[in-house]
Image: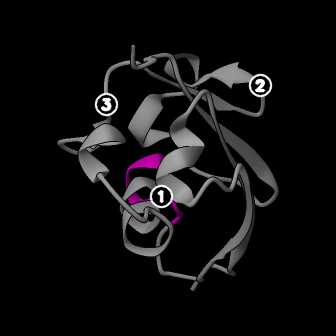
């Protein structure tokens, strides 16, 4: 059984409005038999943090187009996207690039 891991989550560019306006969340993901990956993190965020309008944050099993995801300041596309295995103390940032008019 893997130990719980601490992850720092940030939401910006308007994405924080889906999380009661809270930009930063320090979360501890529970220990489980396999390592946490981004796909599982998105499910956990939906179940535990997302307060409203999930369709503005997720689409299918990934983030909605228009949401930039950075893992430790690197574009998640360089890190394996949904398959990236989270490490203790990772910093994951979600920035909405879609702005309502």
Residue 5 percent location from the top left of the image = 71, 71
Can residue 52 be spotted in the picture? yes
Q: Nearer the viewer, residue 83 or 63?
A: 63
Q: Nearer the viewer, mark 3 or mark 1?
A: 3
Q: Is mark 3 in CB contact (under 8 Å) with mark 1?
A: no
Q: Residue at x 77, y 61 (%)?
A: 88
| Residue 37, visible in the rendered structure | no
Q: Which numbered disc flags the more N-terminal residue, 1 or 2?
A: 1
SS at badge 3: loop
- The quadrant of the rendering that contains the C terminus is top left
Where's residue 80, x and y in %?
A: 48, 28
Residue 75 appears at what percent x and percent y? 61, 18
Tell me the number on the disc at residue 90. none
In the rendered image, which residue does mark 2 sit on?
A: 73
Figure quadrant of residue 8 = bottom right
The answer for how far apart the CA atoms under marks 1 and 2 are is 17 Å
Disc 2 on helix, strand or loop?
loop
Residue shown at the point (37%, 72%) measured from the top left: 47
Left-right relation of 68 to 82: right
The residue segment tinted magenta is 35-40
First of labels 3, 2 by sequence position: 3
Q: Residues within 10 Å of mark 1 (few under 14, many from 20)?
A: some
- Label 2: few (<14), some (14–19) or many (≥20) C-alpha neighbours in 10 Å: few
Per the image, is 18 magenta?
no
Q: Which residue is mark 1?
A: 41
Give the number of the disc on residue 64.
3
Q: CA distance from mark 3 to mark 2?
A: 19 Å
Quarter the N terminus occupies: bottom right
- In magenta segment, residue 38: yes
Does residue 92 appear to the left or right of 52 in the view shown? right
């Amino acid at each position: 059984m893997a130990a719980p891991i601490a992850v720092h989550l940030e939401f910006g560019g308007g994405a924080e409005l889906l999380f009661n306006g809270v930009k930063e969340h320090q979360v501890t993901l529970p220990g489980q038999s396999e390592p946490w990956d981004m796909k599982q993190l998105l499910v956990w965020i939906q179940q535990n943090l997302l307060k409203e309008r999930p369709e503005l944050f997720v689409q299918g099993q990934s983030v909605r187009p228009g949401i930039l995801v950075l893992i430790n300041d690197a574009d998640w596309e360089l890190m394996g996207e949904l398959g990236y295995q989270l490490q203790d103390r990772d910093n994951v940032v979600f920035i909405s690039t879609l702005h309502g008019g």
